[in-house]
Amino acid sequence: MLGSKVALVTGAAMGIGSAMTEELLKHGAKVALLDMNAEAGESLTKTLETKFGKEKTIFIECNVQSEEQLKAAFQKTVDKFGGLDIVCNNAGVLNETEWETTVSINLVGMIRVSYVALDHMNKLSGGRGGVIVNTASVAGLGPLPSCPVYTATKYGVIGFTRAMAMASLGSDYGVRFNALCPSFVNTDLLRKIPERLGRFAHLNELTQGLLSNFGVMSVSKVAEALIELLSEETKTGAALMVMPEGNKYAAFPSEL
């Protein structure tokens, strides 16, 4: 399905990003893996090269907080693969103690990646169009009380995604914008929540209760939802909720 497509994934070395990368490769895409963690990224890339072939992947060490690094990484991807069709804007953290870093990576970094991606994908500037998928969270649709800053960033991801979808349509960019909104996923981020609640550490029991109620999904379930979102070519400005009991698109007030 994605045999002629070139994808770029941020936060690709572990967790959801790693699963997204492998799922894209399974469907025939070529993938650039971007991550700050060079050791994990290079190790994963070697594994993927063995499985899918050396010409299908490239790892680039990159911090989404650096516009210079991002521009270089995108250019390297386009130079190697000849273009860009899919961007999975997935890098993210949860840390209520270092809340400014959480905003910088989850929200500012996500916007920065989107704008650099548009420079390459925008049909008005010679790109071939495509899809940008931003990793949000169900916490961007209903607040997570112990993580107000994380919640705020994920609300921001969804708001930015919906606004950019309309801006792209109105400007004829040829680029769709959608958001993935997973529930609790079995990742390092989830496991470290209790130690990263900062001033809201006393609400950890509430968080663990929500976790028990919702259940925990595998990263592969989120990666499969990504393919669903990429395949639905009529979808732009959509937020796909990925839940243990199944996926569904979020309804927003203007659509009710």
Image (spheres, rainbow, N blue to C red):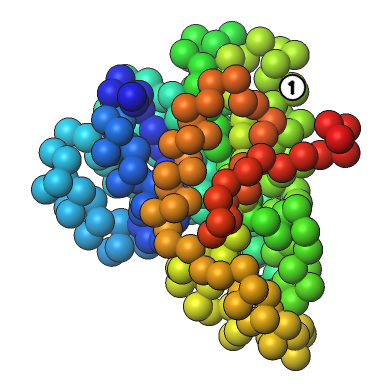
Q: How many marks?
A: 1
Question: In the rendered structure, which amino acid carries the disc numbered 1?
Answer: Ala
Examine the rendered structure and indicate whether residue 9 appears above or below residue 106: above
Counting from the top left corner in percent of width and height, residue 195 is at 59, 85
Residue identified by numbered label 1:
167
Q: Is residue 109 visible?
A: no
Q: Residues within 10 Å of mark 1 (few under 14, many from 20)?
A: some
Viewer-nearest residue: 84 or 26: 26
Quadrant where the image shows the C terminus: top right
Residue 196 shown left or right of residue 64 in the figure: right
Counting from the top left corner in percent of width and height, residue 103 is at 69, 59
Viewer-nearest residue: 45 or 226: 226
**Residue at position x 52%, y 34% from top?**
229
Examine the rendered structure and indicate whether residue 67 appears above or below residue 29: below
**Residue at position x 70%, y 16% from top?**
169
Counting from the top left corner in percent of width and height, residue 133 is at 55, 37
Residue 92 location, quadrant: bottom right
Examine the rendered structure and indicate whether residue 213 appears above or below residue 140: below
Quadrant where the image shows the N terminus: top left
**Residue at position x 60%, y 60% from top?**
183
Viewer-nearest residue: 247 or 130: 247
Residue 252 location, quadrant: top right
Residue 164 shown left or right of residue 7 in the figure: right
